[in-house]
Image (spheres, grey):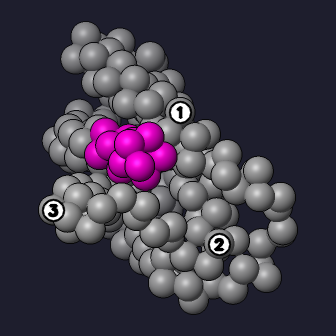
């Protein structure tokens, strides 16, 4: 199996990216009916953004630690930090999509129209763009890491693509925290 993945990393990256983006955009645009997810009490749906901001803040820490550890050649710590980051991202995305599907779409911005147009939307737009750009990069470095022994990873694009992925991921998570603060803190 590892050899099959190794031989098809770009194709698998494309396939997983297409599936992931179809799921996310299907949920955002309301194409996934809320009957496909179990009902939850309102307090559960209301708690999800607060849980997700904790996931985001934790992911910022684990990505930063992973970056620090790989620069200090602590490969096993780096691996654990990046898998933790991936787990936090999957947890975040699962809860986000569940809430989005349950509510039938994104929640409206509760603040003033000028803040919405000139602050919230640009921040949200960059956050979404970076999140979308991260998905294929993350799949690519993950598939390389899973299909190659550590000693061979230096001969792949894992480090080069990983630096870009980690940078974009950090910025996206940070902007997600700002979006949360605008939706649930400031307004």
Above-or-below relation of 76 to 92 = above
Q: Residue at x 76, y 50 (%)?
A: 43
Above-or-below relation of 65 to 54 = above
Classify the position of the N terminus by image quarter.
Answer: bottom right
In the rendered image, residue 83, in percent from the top left (x then y), is placed at 51, 34
Circle 2 sits on which residue? 103
- 97 and 161: which is toward the camera: 97
Q: Nearer the viewer, mark 2 or mark 1?
A: 2
Q: Mark 3 or mark 2, which is nearer the start of the sequence? A: 2
Marks 3 and 1 sit apart, C-alpha to C-alpha, by 26 Å
Quarter-of-image position of residue 25: bottom left
Contact? badges 2 and 3 (CB < 8 Å): no
Please tell me whether the stretch drawn in magenta is mainly helix, strand or loop: helix
Circle 1 sits on which residue? 54
Q: Nearer the viewer, mark 3 or mark 1?
A: 3
Specify the segment rendered in magenta: 173-187
Above-or-below relation of 66 to 95 = above
Circle 3 sits on which residue? 118
* Secondary structure type for disc 1: helix
Above-or-below relation of 122 to 61 = below
Residue 181 in magenta?
yes
């Amino acid at each position: 199996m590892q050899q099959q993945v190794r031989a098809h990393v770009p194709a698998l990256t494309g396939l997983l990216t297409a599936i992931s983006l179809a799921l996310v955009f299907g949920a955002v645009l309301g194409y996934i009916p809320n009957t496909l997810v179990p009902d939850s009490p309102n307090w559960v749906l209301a708690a999800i953004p607060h849980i997700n901001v904790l996931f985001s803040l934790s992911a910022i820490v684990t990505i930063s630690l992973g970056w620090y550890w790989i620069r200090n050649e602590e490969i096993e710590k780096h691996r654990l930090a990046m898998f933790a980051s991936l787990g936090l991202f999957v947890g975040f995305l699962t809860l986000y999509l569940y809430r989005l599907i349950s509510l039938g779409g994104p929640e409206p911005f509760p603040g003033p129209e000028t803040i919405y147009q000139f602050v919230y939307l640009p921040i949200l737009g960059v956050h979404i763009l970076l999140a979308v750009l991260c998905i294929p990069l993350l799949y690519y470095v993950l598939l390389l890491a899973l299909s190659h022994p550590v000693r061979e990873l230096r001969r792949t694009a894992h480090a080069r693509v990983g630096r870009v992925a980690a940078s974009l991921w950090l910025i996206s998570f940070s902007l997600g925290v700002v979006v949360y603060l605008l939706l649930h803190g400031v307004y």
